[in-house]
Amino acid sequence: MRTLRIAQAMASLTLASTLLMPNVSFAQTAGQDMHTAGHDTKDAADDTGHAVKTGTKKTYHKTKHVTKKAAHKTESGTVKAADKTKEGTTVAADKTKETSVKAYDKSKEGVQKVFDPSAHKKSVVTDKARESNMRAKDDVHQDTQKLKDESPK
């Protein structure tokens, strides 16, 4: 019996020493804990600084890219607007010229009708032919202007 009690006590002692031994071997002093905490803080600060640097570079490059893209779109839109303005000006000038010529012809025809009724018919035909030619030339001029505006520069 005595042997059994000794064996049981030895087993308990072995189990207790196995459970407690790792804790004893890894125990640190307060100074070691502070040293480890300082290194952990330094490493975290380094990681944060690296992340900020990387994020700043990415933001800078993305902003640069988007700014270039916006500038290109603005330039393209400005050129397109200038072309449309030029085209509109050409059309407006042609229409104004046509209206002025028609008004002049109507005035002239009215005067001829009063003073020389026989010349009136010939004048109407001549004026219509001239207005038709003028309209055709204006259409060609407008088409040429559109082609110039649409061609790559």
Image (cartoon, helix red, strand yellow):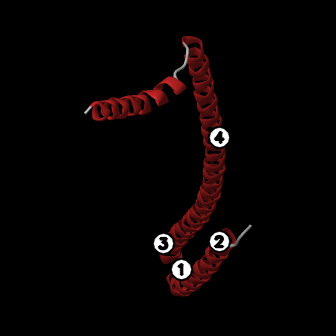
- In primary-sequence order, the first of circles 2 and 1 is 1
- Name the residue carrying label 2: 150
**Circles 2 and 1: CB atoms closer than 8 Å:** no
- Secondary element type, mark 3: helix
State whether residue 91 is above or below residue 141: above
Disc number placed over residue 116 in the picture, else none: 1
Mark 2: secondary structure: helix
Q: Circle 4 sits on which residue?
A: 60
Q: CA distance from mark 3 to mark 4?
A: 74 Å
Disc 3 designates what residue?
Answer: 110
Q: Distance of mark 3 from mark 2, alpha carbons?
A: 44 Å
Q: Residues within 10 Å of mark 4 (few under 14, many from 20)?
A: few
Whole-angstrom CA distance, mark 2 to mark 1, is 50 Å
Q: Residue at x 62, y 43 (%)?
A: 58
- Mark 4, secondary structure of its residue: helix
Label 1 crowd (10 A; few <14 / some 14-19 / many >=20): few
Residue at the location (46% across, 26% down)? 23
Amino acid type of the residue tagged 3 in the rendering: Gly
Task: Say which label, 3 or 4, has the lower sequence index.
Answer: 4
Return the disc, 1 or 4, that comes first in the chain's sequence.
4
Residue 87's image quarter? bottom right
> Mark 4 is on which residue type?
Tyr
Instruction: Tell me the quadrant of the picture where the C terminus can be found.
Output: bottom right
Of the pair 8 and 77, the residue shown nearer to us:
8
Tell me the kind of residue under disc 1.
Asp
86, above or below 142, in the image: above
In primary-sequence order, the first of circles 2 and 4 is: 4
Specify the farthest residue to the left: 1
